Image: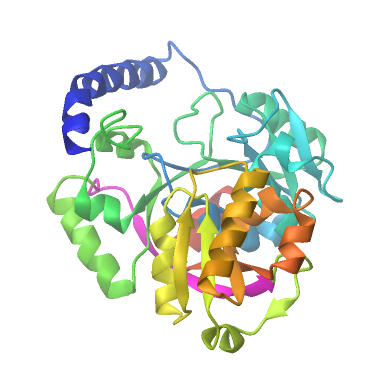
Amino acid sequence: MKIMRKLLLPFSFLYWLGVTIRNWFFDIGFLRSKKVSVPVISVGNVSAGGVGKTPFVELLIEKLSHRGPLSVVSRGYGRKSNGTVVVSDGHGIVSSVENSGDEPMQFAHRYRELIVVVDEQRVRGAQKAIELGARIILLDDGFQHRYLERDLDIVILSADEILDGDVLLPAGNRREPFSSLKRADVIAVTRCADANEYERVCAVGRERHILPVNIPTVGLTTNLKGFKYTSNNEIVNAELLRNKTLIAFSGIGNPKSLKDLMMTAKINVVTYIDFPDHHWYQESDIKRIGDVKNRAHADFILTTEKDATRLRGRFEGFLKTESVITVEIQQEICSGELRVEDLLKRIT
């Protein structure tokens, strides 16, 4: 793998050149951003793969829900459709997960009054959300999509990204050079164990010139919220699971995050099955998961919320008979709570 990455480094240079020229075109006004009639908050990142963006969007939804009709506008990565798709109109879900993508459906499933729109053209998607009554728009995965002007640009960096470093695609996972962080209004550092680790990571980030000294930062921890039966959303007591044997499967950007969370929670997961991010499950996958459970003599099967959205309505029998449980997570601000509140108040 390391040899292959080295061979791809020349292509990473070409990728950097393309990204740099495109951003320069926006900076000089050759390419223009369009402003819409309501505040837009972008949450994005500079890397492909899981950095904790989705739970941070959910944290913002909960903080902003009382300030008027709220919408999430997303590309809907991995969906089997094109154009504008209304996932939820603020009164209920009106699309399928195949047409919406898993993350937008996860938002719509958890927050029934949320307006969720997917569109590869974010300006068009935002305008549709406004037609449906949105008064604040959260632009999901929006850092690279500069055609829609935003009032607040939040970039997510995981602690691992800062400590371990990476190179640009295709040799690495980064979609933009770290120098692009100067466009951000605030940088949220995820996957910190606590405030002390956040301070240590930020010190390393500034020492390595990853974190701009003039951009404010906040620290985030990812915590276990609870467990539910995937088939009916019935709550499962964590103490029950600690005395049982489980297997787990997921198709997420960072499967290690699930393993770390279960280890911290002292849940006895004997086998993890990893699928590609946004994987669309087939009958053969379900059979494989069931076979692994039987061989392990496991009591339950564990999966993530994002995976659960791709299974509901397609494999209901499997979810019920195999005792599939969804783990719910949440993010909490371990440092910079007042900073976040102040930024949100300024624009809303």
Q: Where is residue 341 shown, x and y percent of the image? A: 51, 62
Q: Nearer the viewer, residue 74 or 253?
A: 253
Q: Is residue 127 left or right of residue 265?
A: right
What coloring was used for the rendering? rainbow
Residue 217 colored magenta? yes
Seen in the picture, residue 73 relative to 16 is either above or below; the reply is: below
Report if residue 333 is visible in the image. no
Quadrant of residue 133 in the image? top right
Q: Residue at x 78, y 59 (%)?
A: 317
Q: Nearer the viewer, residue 165 or 185?
A: 165
Quarter of the image for the N terminus: give it: top left
Task: Give the main secondary structure of the magenta stretch.
Answer: strand
Q: Residue at x 53, y 36 (%)?
A: 150
Q: Is residue 286 left or right of residue 2?
A: right
Q: Where is residue 209 shown, x and y percent of the image? A: 16, 45
The residue at the far front in this view is 295
Q: Nearer the viewer, residue 93 or 343?
A: 93
Q: Is residue 318 left or right of residue 210?
A: right
Residue 325 colored magenta? no
Q: Where is residue 113 shown, x and y percent of the image? A: 79, 55
Report if residue 161 is visible in the image. yes
Q: Where is residue 8 shown, x and y percent of the image? A: 22, 24
Q: Is residue 132 left or right of residue 192?
A: right
Seen in the picture, residue 83 relative to 142 is either above or below; the reply is: above
The magenta segment is 211-228
